[in-house]
Image: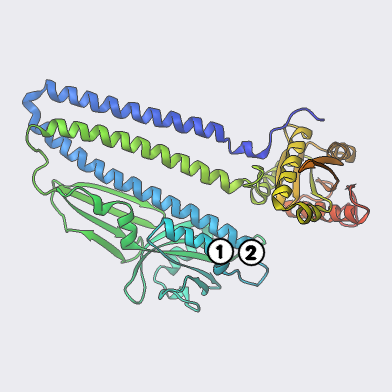
Amino acid sequence: MWEFYTDGVNAVAPDIGRRESVRQFAQALLVSVVVVCVFAGISMALHHSWEQRLAEEGRQAGSAELMTIRQNLFLLMSGQRMFTALLGQRIEESIEGTHGPSLSDLSSYLAYEAETSPSFLYATIARDGKVIDQYPLFDGHSVGFDLSLLPQWKEHILALTSNDTVSLDGPIYDEGGGCYLVSRYLLTWGGEIWGLLTLHYDFRLFLSQIGIDELPSEYRYSFNFTHPGGEETYHWGEDIDEERAVMMEASYSFLSWQMRLVPKGEWAGHGMARTLFAVMGLFISLLMGLFAFLWMRHYQRIERHSVTDSLTGLLNRRQFSRELERECNKKRAFAISLMDIDDFKEINDTWGHLDGDEVLLQLVGRMKESVRMSDTIARFGGDEFIILLRDCYSASFVERLHQALSPFEVTIKGETVRLELSMGVAFYPLDATDADMLVKIADHRMYHAKMEGKGRVCVYSELGS
């Protein structure tokens, strides 16, 4: 066995992330309690100025309400953005050349989004500027719709094409007067732009989700959402131009909004309002601290799942490709080893997929014990795994790794089963300097090893030096 192992999932550092989340939550809670206590003490000590202080507290409470709405907006839109990216990645995995993927095949994802986000309406896939798929059926931008007819085509959709990112945009109006918030994801395949995924959300229901309808009844409010670079706006609430209103402006992606809030009476209430506002301030501080902590945990969980394999906890294929690209850019010698279990289908057919998953986990444990701390393992798909072997120059180095892994024995329902691995290896820069070509060579050599009798390692074939 070779030294120790640190697998690819450590790049996500879940334990560190959890400790950091707890620390930030505790810090936010402490600051909130200290501020509230100090403010209450000063208010009681300076009783003669209580009216001015109550008025200031009232404005701060109004600002806190707007801040909560703002936090809800960012949280909800961040969730939509991450879901769009996740759905886009699943679509990219199903793209086969010119054959377009079907949203109906991903209906479980869309059904989950509709269940957790009531404002979700429908999704579309567009290619070459025209909608080619829609799910579920909706009287919006149906199949055949030309996206270049949209007023925001040049400023926003083409801008997304150049930035290669996920965007949120709104308000967007259709021909029927419907108003949407849209989330867009640039679909790529083979390293090139393939099309555009768009998720449509009902703007009115979206605002209800962030709690605007739940603002205390003693306030009057005005929310104006503006489409940057265009004339589209969406107004919610009353027209408020009073100087005493508290105001907050913010923006996210292609969405900008302005919020104003005033009380129906005066900012300063009766004498008991001092205590009530202190209690309210403490409650809001605690709530916002807890809300931030839960949001961070949710974000870390989504981020971790986006780069790791759900079964093994190793890096997934997409994240490994990024690691491989970065390693190529360092211009230092390394090798990649692509392997799979010979005749693994017989395991699934004989024992079932649950026991097949257990075999994979046992293999992962064996690999963790056999590679070095500097190496990175990823699940490439099915029973295929790939290892990035840094500072690896020779075939003997890889052959010793293969000897450490194959053959290996696993126990299934009390029965010992002997399994072997076929491995294909590619060296940088000897075989290639391009990440995709290195993977292609390793894949070719792995199947060459299978054709030579399985349970072998191949470091040479007609593809690559």
Q: Secondary structure at mark 1?
A: helix
Q: Position of residue 217 (x, y in %)?
A: 16, 50
State the mark number for residue 3.
none
Q: Height in image: 20 above or below 85?
A: above
Graded by Cα atoms within 10 Å as few (under 14), some (14 to 19) or many (20 or more), the crowding at tag 1 reads some
- Residues at discs 2 and 1 in contact (Cβ within 8 Å): yes
Q: Amino acid at mark 1?
A: Leu
Closer to the observer: label 2 or label 1? 1
Question: Could you say where residue 328 lies in the image, as x and y percent from the top left?
Answer: 72, 45
Position in image of residue 154 (x %, y %): 45, 68
In the image shown, does 356 or 87 lie closer to the viewer? Answer: 356
Taking the image as shown, residue 256 lies to the left or right of residue 414, namely left
Which comes before the other along the chain, label 2 or label 1? Answer: 2
| Residue 322 visible in the snapshot | yes
With 52 as the anchor, is 310 left or right in this view? right
**Residue 47 appears in which quarter of the rendering?**
top left
User: As shown in the figure, which amino acid type bears the numbered disc 2?
Assistant: Ser
Image coords of residue 220 (percent x, y):
16, 52
Would you name the residue on which mark 2 appears?
94
The quarter in which the N terminus is drawn is top right
Q: Quadrant of residue 292?
A: top left
Q: Which residue is mark 1?
A: 106
Residue closer to the observer: 126 or 120: 120
- As measured in the structure, the alpha-carbon distance from the residue carrying label 2 to the one carrying label 1 is 10 Å
In front: 296, or 106? 106
Of helix, strand and loop, which one carries label 2?
helix
